[in-house]
């Protein structure tokens, strides 16, 4: 078994060890333009969409924004809930990273919100987080 694969299957690696925190969120009712500005300011490719109680309602990605504007489905003044992905695939903090990576690959998704038992966001796992982990693991084994 390749060293990296063995490392990724380590029982130590859970969502909570890899997720980016704090999660970047936006409330339902905000505009697509506000979402784009927030993504640019925070340097992220997705936002977790929450309601007024802080519960996850969806996820909004750069792709969602680009596709909706390019297709004419929405305008910059439109609301995030009009173009967000509802009922996103989510993870809990103790989910195995290997399972999360397989979900991301199999479902062709690049971001997975990590939520608590009440449905509030704790963090986000992105493809970038996994790449960063892989680079760190490779450095450990090369040294």
Image: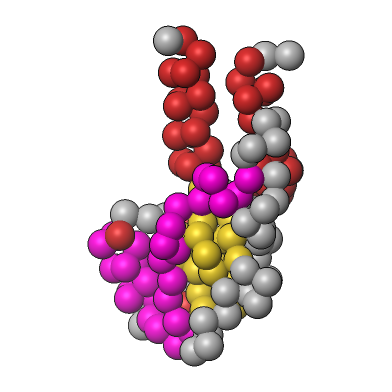
Q: In this orientation, which residue lies closer to the viewer: 71 or 56?
A: 56
Residue 34 rendering spot, x and y as whole percentages: 32, 76
> Is 19 placed above or below 5 here?
below
Q: Which residue is drawn at 65% across and 65% down?
A: 88
Please give the range of residues in magenta: 14-41
Q: Give the total number of marks visible in the rendering.
A: 0
Name the image quarter holding the C terminus: top left
> Is 65 placed above or below 102 here?
below
Q: In this orientation, which residue lies closer to the viewer: 143 or 23?
A: 143
Q: Residue at x 51, y 81 (%)?
A: 54
Farthest residue toward the top? 142
Residue 45 rendering spot, x and y as whole percentages: 42, 55
> Is 10 placed above or below 69 here?
above
Is residue 89 visible in the rendered image? The answer is yes
> Is 29 a magenta residue?
yes
Is residue 101 visible in the rendered image? The answer is no
Name the image quarter holding the N terminus: top right
Please state if 136 lies on the left or on the right of 33 as rendered: right
Q: In this orientation, which residue lies closer to the viewer: 140 or 66?
A: 140
Residue 42 rendering spot, x and y as whole percentages: 30, 60
Residue 96 rendering spot, x and y as whole percentages: 70, 44
Farthest residue toward the front? 12
> Is 23 a magenta residue?
yes
Please state if 125 lies on the left or on the right of 104 as rendered: left
Q: Which residue is drawn at 43% across and 57% down?
A: 21
């Amino acid at each position: 078994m390749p060293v990296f694969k063995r490392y990724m299957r380590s029982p130590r690696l859970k969502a909570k060890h890899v997720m980016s925190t704090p999660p970047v969120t936006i409330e339902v009712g905000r505009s697509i333009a506000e979402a784009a500005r927030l993504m640019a300011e925070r340097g992220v490719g997705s936002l977790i969409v929450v309601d007024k109680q802080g519960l996850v309602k969806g996820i909004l990605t750069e792709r969602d924004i680009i596709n909706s504007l390019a297709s004419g489905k929405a305008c910059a003044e439109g609301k995030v809930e009009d173009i967000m992905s509802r009922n996103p695939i989510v993870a809990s903090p103790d989910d195995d990273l290997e399972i999360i990576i397989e979900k991301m690959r199999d479902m062709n998704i690049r971001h997975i919100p990590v939520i608590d038992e009440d449905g509030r966001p704790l963090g986000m796992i992105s493809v970038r987080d996994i790449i960063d982990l892989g680079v760190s693991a490779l450095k450990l084994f090369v040294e």
